[in-house]
Image (cartoon, rainbow, N blue to C red):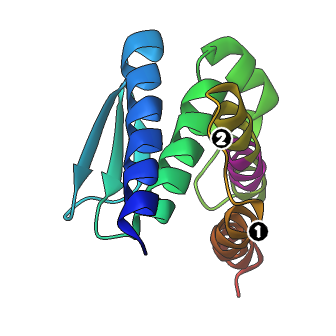
Amino acid sequence: MQEKERQKLRKHIEDVEIYLEDVKNIVVIFDRKVGNTYCGNVITINNCQHLRYQLHTLLHEAGHALIRGNKKRFEQKFPGLQKRRNSKSFKLDTLKEEFEAWDKGFKLAKRLDIILDEKQWKRHSEQCLHEYVKWVTGE
């Protein structure tokens, strides 16, 4: 990857971080010893990933933050997430939320004027979503 491309990706990551911190009051932590998660007011991103994947993952986790921003609406839309972790309802609503988080992340990128390589975004999101599909189906 060329230095110009790396700088552009770092700038996009910074733009998302600023939005999350200033608008949503969410702290973003990059570390090599963390998973990619959104919990409470914190998003963690494993920085061992390629920069492009870090951007994608950050947008995806921001998508979760946007989905969960209104607790009442979230619980109404995904009632299965209140059930047992191995229940069919829990797994299906988890899968639904994952799909929606990728969609919200993509829309957030557009709102922040971040131009994504849609082919690479699609490949990365499908790869991640496929893992959830395997978990839901027990493969």
Percent from the top left, x then y, of residue 71? 61, 16
Boundaries of the magenta span: 94-102
- Image quarter (top left, top right, bottom left or bottom right) of the N terminus: bottom left
Which residue sits at x=40%, y=55%?
A: 36
98 drawn magenta: yes
Q: Quadrant of residue 56?
A: bottom right
What is the three-letter code of the residue carrying label 1? Lys
**Measured from the top left, where is residue 15 in percent x and y?**
45, 31
Q: Which amino acid, mark 2?
A: Gly
Q: Is residue 95 left or right of residue 62?
A: right
Q: Going 76% across and 44% down the picture, which residue do you hit? A: 103
Label 1 neighbour load within 10 Å: few <14, some 14-19, many 20+: few
Checking the image for residue 129, the label placed there is none
78 relative position to 37: left or right = right
Residue 60 lies in the magenta stretch: no
- Locate residue 21 relative to residue 84 in the image: left or right: left
What is the CA distance from the residue labelled 2 to the residue labelled 1? 15 Å
> Residue 90, percent across and down?
69, 51
Q: Residues within 10 Å of mark 2 (few under 14, many from 20)?
A: many
**Which disc number belongs to residue 119?**
1
Task: Indicate which label's residue lies in the foreground, 2 or 1.
Answer: 1
Q: How many marks?
A: 2
**Residue with the mark numbered 2:** 105
- The quadrant where residue 31 appears: bottom left
Which residue appears at 67% of the width and 75% of the height? 127
| Vertical order, 58 against 20 (above or below) | below
Q: Which element is circle 2 on?
A: helix
**Secondary structure category for the residue under label 1:** helix
Residue drawn where x is 35% and y is 65% of the image: 3
Task: Examine the rendered structure and indicate whether residue 99 appears above or below residue 109.
Answer: below
